[in-house]
Image: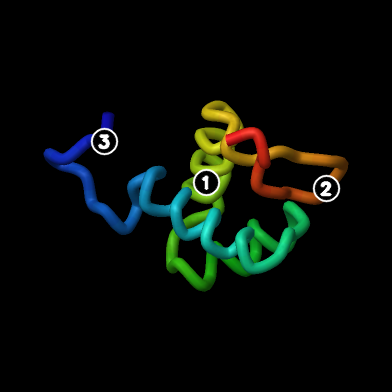
């Protein structure tokens, strides 16, 4: 379910999650790189990036190996 009312799409975890997945499709990144680069690139707070990563992990779209974040191939 995607929230539509009262939610700014620029700070929605679904929108941010899609941007993170697009970036990860180009190359796997470390958590540090995602937190710092994506925060400034997407112009959102680190809290929004963390919530988006948490959501992506919860739906098993991404996996984490040490500090490396990658798209889960099982999806």
- Circle 1 SS class: helix
Which image quadrant for residue 25? bottom right
- Circle 3 SS class: loop
Residue under the image location 65 percent in, 34 percent down:
74
Give me the disc on residue 47. Answer: 1
Residues at marks 2 and 1 touching, judged by CB atoms closer than 8 Å: no
The residue that mark 3 highlights is 2
- The x, y position of residue 42, in whole percent, is 45, 67
The residue that mark 2 highlights is 67
Q: Quadrant of the C terminus?
A: top right
Residue under the image location 22 percent in, 35 percent down:
3
- Say which label, 3 or 1, has the lower sequence index: 3
Residue occupying the far bottom of the picture? 41
Distance in Å between CA atoms under marks 3 and 1: 19 Å
- How packed mark 1 is, by other alpha carbons closer than 10 Å (few <14, some 14-19, many 20 or more), is few
Between 19 and 50, the one nearer to me in the picture: 19
- Say which label, 2 or 1, has the lower sequence index: 1
Residue under the image location 52 percent in, 29 percent down:
59
Marks 3, 1: nearer the viewer: 3
């Amino acid at each position: 379910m995607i929230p539509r009312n009262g939610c700014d799409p620029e700070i929605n975890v679904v929108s941010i999650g899609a941007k993170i997945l697009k970036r990860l499709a180009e190359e796997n990144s470390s958590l540090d790189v995602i937190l710092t680069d994506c925060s400034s690139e997407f112009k959102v707070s680190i809290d929004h990036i963390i919530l988006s990563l948490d959501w992506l992990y919860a739906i098993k779209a991404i996996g984490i190996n040490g500090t490396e974040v990658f798209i889960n191939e099982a999806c």
